[in-house]
Each structure stands twice: as C-alpha cells, then as structure tokens.
Image (spheres, rainbow, N blue to C red):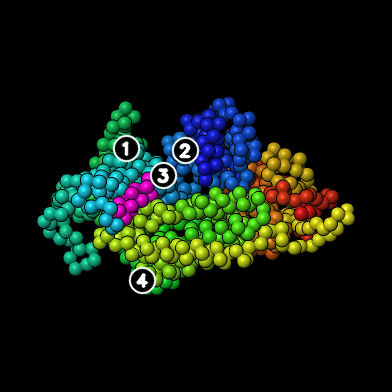
Amino acid sequence: MRKYEELAKAIVEGVGGKDNIISLAHCYTRLRFKLHDEKKAATETIKNLDGVVTVVQSGGQYQVVIGNEVGEVHDEIVKSQGIADGSAAEKTEPDKNMNLLDKFVDIISGIFTPILGVLAASGMIKGFTALFVALGWIEEKSGTYQILQTIGDGLFYFFPIFLGITAARKFKMNEFSAMAVGAALVYPTLSVIFTGQPLYRMFEGTIFASPVQLEFLGIPVILMNYASSVIPIIAAIYFASKVERGLAKVIPAMVKGFMVPFFTLLIVIPVTFIVIGPISTWAGQIVGAVTTGVFNFSPILAGFFLGAFWQVFVIFGLHWGLVPIMINNIATSGTDHIVAMTFAASFAQTGVVLAVLLKTKHAKLKSLCVPAFISGIFGVTEPAIYGITLPRKKMFVISCIGAAIGGGMLAFFDSQYYMFGGLGIFGYPSFVNSAINDMAGMKGAMMVSAAAFMLGLLMAYPLYRDKEEIKSTVVPKDGNGLVEKEFFTSPLTGTVRTLEDVPDETFSSGVLGKGVAVEPIEGRVVAPADGTVATLFPTGHALGLITEKGTEILIHIGIDTVKLNGQYFSTKVKQGDRVKQGQILVEFDMDKIREGGYSVITPVLIANFQQYLDIIVTEKKEISYTENLITVIA
C-alpha cells in the first residue's frame, strides 16, 4: 500500500496541489481531475512517475491514466490527501444514478473512512490497556492505567463530535456547526442530569418506556447516553444540512456568516434532543437486537456465512454496511458478535499467499507475495486479494473456505469484540473482556486465526499451479519447440480499425494494451471467449474479462463515454460472472451515443500483452461475432 500512498501524493503535487483541484473521479483506467488551472500541472513529471501510464487532457478534464490499479490509487488519494471529502471537492454526495445500496455504502464509507485509522488506533490502545491489566502488568488504580485509558477512550466518548465533522463533509454543511451539534450531545452537565431522578416517565408499558429528566419550552426531553453513539449524530447532521441550506437561501448575505449557524444550532439541537436522538437511539437498539437475534438463531451458520463472504463484501465495498452495525452494537450492548466472526478471514487469505510464495517459480509473483504476506499478517489483505488470489480464482475460493471454517469456529467459541481495534495480529486485544479481565476470548481468537492460516496454507499448497503449466492448443513455431495459441472471436460486428484510428492517445499509443478496434454496426457486445467478468464499470461502457487461460481482455465501448453516466448502456452480466463465448455482455444505443457527440469506435485490447510473444489481429476489414479477431501466442 506504500506505493499507492507515495504515488497519490506525487500525483496531487503534480497537478498543482490540493488547492488546484476542483473535483476527482475515476473510470476504468484513469483518474479524472477537474482543475482550476491546467497550466499549473507538471504533465511531463506526472508521465514519468512509476505507476502512471500517461496523461490525457480532454473535454475539460485532466486525465491521469493508471491502468488496472486506478481504483486503489483513487482511494489512496481520497484517504491520504482528503480530496473527495474536503472543501475542494465539487461533488461528494452519492450519484443520483446509484441504487439504494450503493448510496448507503457511499455515505457510510464517506463518513467512516477519514477516521478509520484513528478509530483503530484508539481501539488498539484500549485493547492493549485491557490486556496489560489482565496480565497483571498494570493496576486499574495506577496513573499509567488512567492515562492509557484516557488516550484510548477519548475518541469513543466524544465520537459524535468526530462523526459530526465527517458527516458534515459528506452532507456538505459547515463543519464547525456540525461539531457543535456533536458536542451538545455529549455535554457533561446533561450526563449528570441523565443519571438523576426523572420528572416522570413516557411510553410506560412499551419497549420505548423512558424517563423524562427535563423539559424544553414545556416539551418533554428524553435524555439518552450519546457517548460512543453512531446513528443519532449522522441523522442529526443530515437534518442539519437541510436546515442550513434552507436558511442560507433566505438570510441576507451581510449577516449570513453568523445568523445561519445561529438559527441552525437553535433549531437542530433541540429537535435532536426531543425527536431525532431518542428515535435514532431506539433504532440503534433495534438494529443491535436484530443482528444479535440473527446470530443467536444459528451462531455457527452465521459464522460460516460471514467468514466465507467477508472478502467478497470487501471487494464490492459492502463491508461498510457492517462497520457501523459493529460500532453500534459495542456502544449499545458492549460487545459485537457480527464482525468478530470475520476476524479469521485475513489469516486464511495470508496462508494462501504463503502457499503461492512457496510454490511459485516466478520471480515477479514471488516479489508480489512477500509484501502481500506481510501486510496480510497485519490485516491488510487488498494486495493479497487483488494481486495474488483473485486473479487465480481457485486460490481465492480456498481463502474463502478457510475464512468460513474460521468464522464457524469463532462462533462456536462465542468469540466477540469488546472494542473496535486493530486488524490482523493487532486485533487480538479486541477480544479481551476488560470488565472482568478475561483473556479467554483472545486466546480463542489466536487459536482460530492460526487454524485458518494453516487451512489456507495446507489447502492451497498442493493445488496451486503456475499459469504457464496449464496446457492449451499447441502448434510448432519455426521448428524451435512448442508455443501456445489462444483465439478470440470478435465481441462486435462491424468494421475493423487499427488502434491508430482511435481518437484517443491512450488507446492509439497502445500503452493500455495491444489489439484492435471495431467500428460497430450493431449495439451489442458479446464474450470473445469463455472466462470471467473481472471488471464491469457501473456505467457499462467498459469491462474486463479474464479467460480460463489467464488472458486479460479490455473492451471499451466508445471514447469518453464514461461521461454518459450509464445512459444508453444496458449490462447483461455482473462483475464476477462466468460467461461463455458469444454470450451477450452489454447492449448500447449507438444512435443516441453518436447524437450526444461521442464516437462508438471500440478498442478491444489484450491488457497483459507483455506476457505473450505476439498479439496477431485479423486482416479482415469487416468482422462478425463468429469470426476470429485476435490471436495471442504465449
């Protein structure tokens, strides 16, 4: 991950710094910047960066072409440079074309990603403090314990303030007003009132029965403990963002600077205490009860399921939906079973990586395995997933099997998180029950993670084969031995063009791959070979296939068609689907795309062309779906 961090920093500096960036997005292969002044960008310097393919300036965008790793580089820029979440971002709200699940994941990831590092660090400090007490190294009455506990617990106690900042960035409102809302929720004086004698009780005889400690303008206020809470502050800031924007439209500009925050706080904080806070807290308790109930219905089955699919959730970003549930469960009940069941997944993945490292004879793959193994030990498995196991499908499945068994074992031993802490080996202290100084959960987690690691290693080692050992059709070449050939039919019907005919330097120069282009006469793309949909961009304009023999094929429908945001494209498959040659992948409306001013010429590229002796394209001028378009020679 270090290389992405350094590359992200260098790219931001190269485009003229953070202040020169209006917005940032990415498509299948490129980072797409909108800059205040493109003349400030050091284009030649960026082109020469290790990890950058080239730079294209087109359509008002400054496009830095990365290739297959564009997603990782984009995420690193968002995380380390704060572009998408800062005031320089032009658009941080979810795209209107997203479905509800995508919008939910986008909001949650946008709110939690900026604080995830310090959140894990604080949890680790709390975890190690609990561990040191359980081991008898420090006493709870000692000053050392008090300071360590303060360091670890400070973030969690004032969590609404931190979430107020990140939620404000996501919902686009004044961050300091949002902090004030969060601070009000954890105001110490109200905490004292919360523990006092109630005036009376409301909703008696229901699950919402609550004491009323005070009134505001005669309206009863049900005080809740908002320290470490998640849902109330996010709901409050969403409401506050709407109030603030409404006030900004009606308050005169000369007094807007202080009157908008004045009325925002005066409206939002009472409404939060009276309505939003209690309802959100009850919702959080219901979520915690439901997730615990689902787990208790069949703990081992839940462990198997969560363990097996955790890495799949990570690939598609769905794991963000479980992170706030985990934090909410710890805040409401003190423990979390749900995400705890996924703890063994990183160890199973790392065991598979070690098997590949020990078995492969390829120096380049070995060089990828070493850092992936090290990062995996510390719970960071993206290098292992994307670089090692996912491209070798069987290895990824084995890691999921090991994770599933590990999840079932964790459930069997009733392992649970008592705090949100570190990843990998740094996650062990999260299983220590500090309330009774019990280390049984941590010992169980250590045994299960070791078992998952060994399962991944022992299952993967005998089954792993280097790709070159997979035999395919062979033909003699110049009498000097045998070579492998793989044939691909055309994914489109139309006129064959050379890459030089493509009106985009990135494709015409061949830096993204070798191949050919097709000017289609029919708005349909079919699979050129049996394989797996490795990548499918949400807009449907580009997709990548990996054949059963490991060839990576990129099909990019039209030029700059990402700007259509999926309009006129209809995908017929999903990312991860196995497809057969001739199967329809995407349909598109050529006429509408052309009317929008876009070319529909479609590059068909072999992305991993460096692994082959030669890439041969057809000499035909017109091509149909059943005819060979490209031949690769290994």
Side of 271 relative to 531 (left or right): left
Q: Which residue is mark 4?
A: 296
Specify which label sits upstream in the sequence, 3 or 1: 3
Circle 1: element type:
helix
Could you tell me the amino acid type at mark 2?
Gln
Q: Quadrant of residue 326?
A: bottom left
Magenta portion: prevailing SS class? helix
Say whether disc 3 or disc 4 marks the residue closer to the N-terminus: 3
Say which mark, if any, is on residue 378. Answer: none
Name the residue located 59 percent from the left edge and 28 percent from the top edge.
42
Q: Nearer the viewer, mark 2 or mark 1?
A: 2
Q: Mark 1: which amino acid?
A: Phe
State which mark lies toward you, 3 or 1: 3
Q: In percent of the image, x 59 and y 46: which residue is there?
A: 69
The disc placed on residue 176 is: 1
Find disc 3 in the rendering and name its residue.
Answer: 114
Q: Nearer the viewer, residue 414 or 93?
A: 414
Q: Which residues are magenta?
A: 118-132
